[in-house]
């Protein structure tokens, strides 16, 4: 008979000693991505009929026929550039560039015009599209002189699209793309 009383005392003392501070779950950690201040240098564009400035964090890979990849290894991202001469086909080139952009509408939450560019001195005219959501590309753009030259560009990350995760990198690279467009000169 002493055993049940002793057992009750142990259980009661364990229950009383278990009472104390309430356990609070730790908040989820948030990844903070910071990138260095961008510095720019003239890009190596080879025999291509255009030139621009590039971020010093990036490297350019020439894929031939004036197709350049501006690679950002630290961000696992690439800006793909494709040059095409204008031969009485400007309307077709513009429609193709817009079609490439709006092909992302399936996964995009929003496709907005991030800016229209006009540099009459250098004869550079263009448009930048910013794509919000889990689309494959976050930015698409084109520049032209409307008579001889047409260049399209698109930004891709080497990861499954997760807009919230890649947003800081996409914003950083959008600034580089804007700088590329603003510094564009035809040879």
Image (cartoon, rainbow, N blue to C red):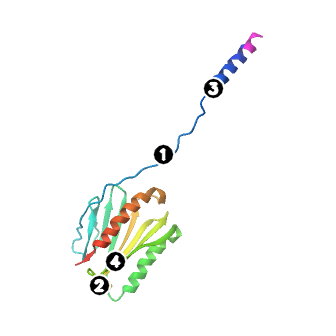
Please say whether residue 2 is one of the residues in the magenta stretch.
Answer: yes
Prevailing secondary structure class for the magenta stretch in the rendered image: helix
The residue tagged 2 is 148
Q: Earlier in the sequence, mark 1 or mark 3?
A: 3
Q: Which residue is mark 1?
A: 29
Residue at the outermost bottom position: 88
Alpha-carbon neighbours of circle 2 within 10 Å: few (<14), some, or many (≥20)?
A: some
Give whichever of discs 1 and 4 has the lower sequence position: 1
Answer yes or no: do the residues labelled 1 and 4 have beta carbons within 8 Å? no
- Which residue is denoted by mark 3 in the rendering? 18
Residue at left 37%, top 53%?
Answer: 34
For label 4, the residue is 143
Name the quarter where the N terminus is drawn. top right
| Cα distance between the residues tagged 1 and 4 | 41 Å
Which of the 4 image quadrants contains residue 99? Answer: bottom left
Identify the secondary structure beneath mark 3: helix
Residue at (56%, 39%) from the top-left corner? 25
- On whether residue 107 falls in the magenta region, the answer is no
Residue 141 vs 162, above or below: the answer is: below
Q: Is residue 72 above or below residue 80?
A: above
- x, y percentage for residue 118? 33, 79
Q: Which residues are magenta?
A: 1-5
Tell us which disc is closer to us: 3 or 2: 3
Crowding near pointer 3: few (<14 within 10 Å), some, many (20+)?
Answer: few
| Percent coordinates x, y for residue 62 in the rendering | 27, 68
């Amino acid at each position: 008979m002493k055993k049940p009383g002793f057992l009750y005392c142990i259980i009661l003392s364990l229950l009383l000693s278990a009472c104390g501070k309430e356990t609070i779950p730790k908040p989820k950690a948030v990844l903070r991505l910071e990138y260095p201040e961008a510095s720019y240098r003239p890009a190596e564009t080879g025999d291509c009929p255009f030139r621009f400035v590039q971020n010093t964090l990036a490297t350019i890979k020439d894929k031939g026929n004036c197709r350049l990849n501006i690679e950002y290894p630290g961000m696992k991202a690439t800006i793909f550039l494709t040059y095409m001469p204008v031969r009485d086909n400007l309307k077709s080139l513009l429609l193709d560039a817009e079609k490439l952009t709006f092909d992302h509408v399936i996964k995009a939450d929003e496709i907005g015009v991030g800016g229209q560019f006009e540099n009459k001195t250098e004869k550079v005219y263009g448009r930048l599209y910013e794509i919000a959501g889990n689309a494959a590309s976050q930015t698409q753009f084109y520049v032209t002189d409307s008579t001889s030259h047409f260049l399209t560009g698109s930004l891709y990350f080497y990861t499954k699209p997760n807009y919230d995760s890649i947003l800081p990198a996409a914003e950083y690279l959008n600034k580089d793309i804007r700088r590329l467009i603003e510094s564009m000169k035809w040879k």
